[in-house]
Image (cartoon, helix red, strand yellow):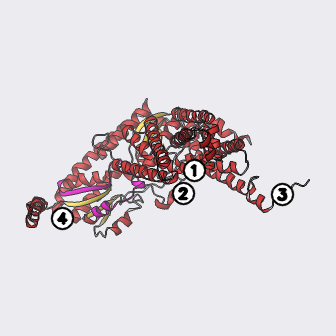
Amino acid sequence: MITRRKAVASTCAALMPGFVLRFAPAYAQESPVKAIATFSILADFVRNVGGGRADVAALVGPNGNAHVYAPSPADAKKVADAKVVFVNGLGFEGWLDRLVKASASTAPVIVASKGIKPIERSADDHGAAHEHDHGRADPHAWQSVPNAKIYVANIRDALAALDPAGKPVYESNADSYLGKLDALDREVRDVIASIPADRRRVITSHNAFDYFGAAYGINFTAPQGVSTESEASAKDVAAIITQIRRDKATAVFLENVTDPRLMRQIATETGAKVGGVLYSDALTDPSRDAPTYIDLIRHNLKQLAAALTS
Amino acid sequence: MFELLIAPFTEFEFMRRALAGALALALGAGPIGVFLMLRRMSLVGDAMAHAILPGAAVGFLLSGLNLFAMTAGGLLAGFIVALLTGLVARTTELKEDAALATFYLLSLALGVTIVSIKGTNVDLLHVLFGNVLALDDQTLLLIAANASISLVVIALIYRPLVIECVDPGFMRSVSRAGGPAHLAFLALVVINLVSGFHALGTLLAVGIMMLPAAIGRFWARDITLMIAIATLSGALAGYVGLLLSFHTGIASGPAIILLAGVLYVASLLFGRVGGLLRQLFPGRHLEA
């Protein structure tokens, strides 16, 4: 017969190992800095700089869409537990302020895009309706590799200020990662230089590549505004088709966050080549094409080169 | 005039496809909406729209944005809910509306659960449900096939349907065709909603079914004429709505439904049968 005392004792015994395990690392070594990044690409940067000293979680995970993201109570808990919160800024995370307030977090919020020269959304972007939560700046600054280096520097400085003991680690991590980004930047420039200038005209379903285009000299246009929230009207689609015909755009790209059927329709109607998927706001699962930022840029570059040169 | 009314369709293929889709949908949905309305089942379309979600979601999770997987899933879920509803309503004390309410809510809950298990933040509803501007060949064929099937089946079960609408008691006393006809009719509701979904989105699928029917009610007492008017007003709303979206830049689906709404308000005011103005200022009685 199981007595009450026995039950209590066995429950305690069952809980003990977990209890011990949870607290053991704190004595064994310094516990890692708990950091939150709002989306997967930013989390990748923080992971590269933090190495083993930072425990990084992304609020909007791989394949998620940060534009229409709705925080859950579990996210509020993650934010409350975090020592530091990294955000993109430039109006990308309209939902974040309320989340930080709601979670009663005291963690500093670090704007990783600080110091980047924002690109205004182009005037012909028919985007007046989207301004309510984005302002005029285009938030997708990480799409240009030189900007990504600014993100990394900001993250390095923030982590070093927060955890002075780890400063040398962060600096050496950041240096080696910045080196990889420099190599990536050269790679992108080399490949794009091999594409004839008059063929560098691309339509994508999500206006997220203006920074990439500005940095490397490719002309991107989109049938929808800067946000993926609104549905394209017949007028928008007609405008983009007219634009493809007039500009003789070479390629049309689909994306992992908006309706691919519309893109396919536009491509069949204009004869522009349909490229694969260009990733913009999110990394993919580890098993797919773009589990890290460097993979993401390489993947996009490969897709662009294939569609524009053939 | 040509620039305004015709040119968008001659210049752009996607506009022609959208128009063809809208017309085919109006053709199938018109008569079905009228029967739904006459049987006081106007909200059934909306409920069924939710019931279809888990099937379409499973189809999407299994094979991505695949028209046939999602259609098959949606049809299956819709048929199951329709059949269970019919069974419960005809064999137990529960009336049809309550039976449908229970099953569609369960189905919706299941659908949302399935969607959330997948765990992406991408708005699955946006992915699941189509866009009138993006009709490819497959989708157009699906809509056209559904409209054709609907018209043929309605022609076959027209008499029992009409009699059951007007006098269900009499129908039961003279024939056993009422039950099967009713089930066949519910099946038509499901296939029209599913095709409307993939082609045009939730709002449009139900809207293009019920608003034209209500419009027809204000202009005709005769059921044949009512169906004709419903189908025509649905088609008109589709055509003018697309033009509106083309010229002003408002989203196409809502534009079509809002146009139908304008027609509805006009019918409500000026309709020959029971319109408000007609009731306020009745014509003089015929005198011998």
The chain containing the residue under callout 3 comes to B
Q: Position of residue A310 (x, y in %)?
A: 43, 29
| Gap in angstroms between the C-alphas marked 3 and 2 | 49 Å
In primary-sequence order, the first of circles 4 and 2 is 2
| Gap in angstroms between the C-alphas marked 2 and 1 | 38 Å
Q: Which mark is residue B283?
A: 3
Pick the quarter of the image with the N terminus of chain B: top right
The chain containing the residue under callout 4 comes to A
The kind of secondary structure element at disc 4 is helix
Q: Which residues are magenta?
A: A52-79
Residue closer to the observer: B207 or A156: B207
> Where B212 falls versus B158 (above or below)?
below
Residue A87 shows up from this direction? yes
Q: Which mark is residue B41?
A: 1
Q: Which residue is mark 2?
A: A129
Disc 3 residue crowd, few under 14, some 14–19, many 20+, Cα 10 Å: few
Disc 2 residue crowd, few under 14, some 14–19, many 20+, Cα 10 Å: few
Same chain for the residues under marks 4 and 2 in the image: yes
Q: Which mark is residue A164?
A: 4
Residue closer to the observer: B195 or A211: B195
Q: Closer to the observer: label 3 or label 2?
A: 3
| Gap in angstroms between the C-alphas marked 4 and 3 | 90 Å
Q: Residue at x 69, y 42 (%)?
A: B232
